[in-house]
Amino acid sequence: MDVFEELVRDHRIIEQHFVEIEQTTEVECRERLFRELRARFEAHEVFEEETLYPEMEQLPSTKLVVGEAFDTHAELDQILQEIAEVPVNKSEWIDRIRELKEMIQEHMRKEETIFPAVRTGLAKTRAEELGRQFQERTSVLDAGRADRRNSTSPV
């Protein structure tokens, strides 16, 4: 898969993390799911910032959106940190999770809208190479997620 297919696949995994968080009220489970969500998002954003965005800055059709993407990542990081400081059993915690979910979903929609322009500007082999790099970075997260799903413990 090329980098865009990998990133979209990761977007769906991030969305699933939110579904799982919202479906449970168990404190320990929510804490674990939040840690997983945060690790996934941070790995995703670091890859974009270090690898994909520099490529996008070279393309006339997408270089202007890179600054906005960095700003959005910074804002999302701040919210993630704020959520981490709120006790999971407080109603404010789930409210902040829902706020984060909406913001991340909007960010992902914007990214997925510009991916075709970036794909056009990148050589197919480069897009595939970046896809392999992203897959390597997230394989540990995917393995942990699979292990959890295969265990007999609840979500």
Image (cartoon, helix red, strand yellow):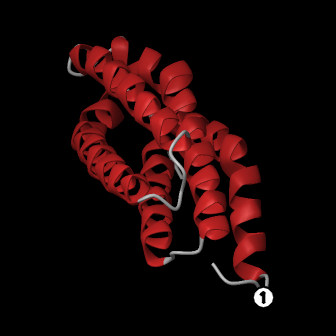
Comparing 28 with 41, the one in front is: 28
Q: Secondary structure at mark 1?
A: loop
Q: Specify whether 143 is left or right of 102.
A: right
Comparing 46 with 33, the one in front is: 33
Tally of marks: 1
Q: Is residue 6 above or below residue 27?
A: above
* Horizontal and vertical percent position of residue 56: 36, 20
Residue at screen point 63% across, 54% down: 36
Comparing 83 with 43, the one in front is: 83
* Horizontal and vertical percent position of residue 48: 49, 29
Residue at screen point 20% across, 20% down: 61
Q: Specify whether 97 is left or right of 125.
A: left
> Residue type at mark 1?
Thr
* Residue underneath mark 1: 152
Q: Specify whether 134 is left or right of 56.
A: right
Can you name the residue that lies furthest to the bottom here?
A: 152
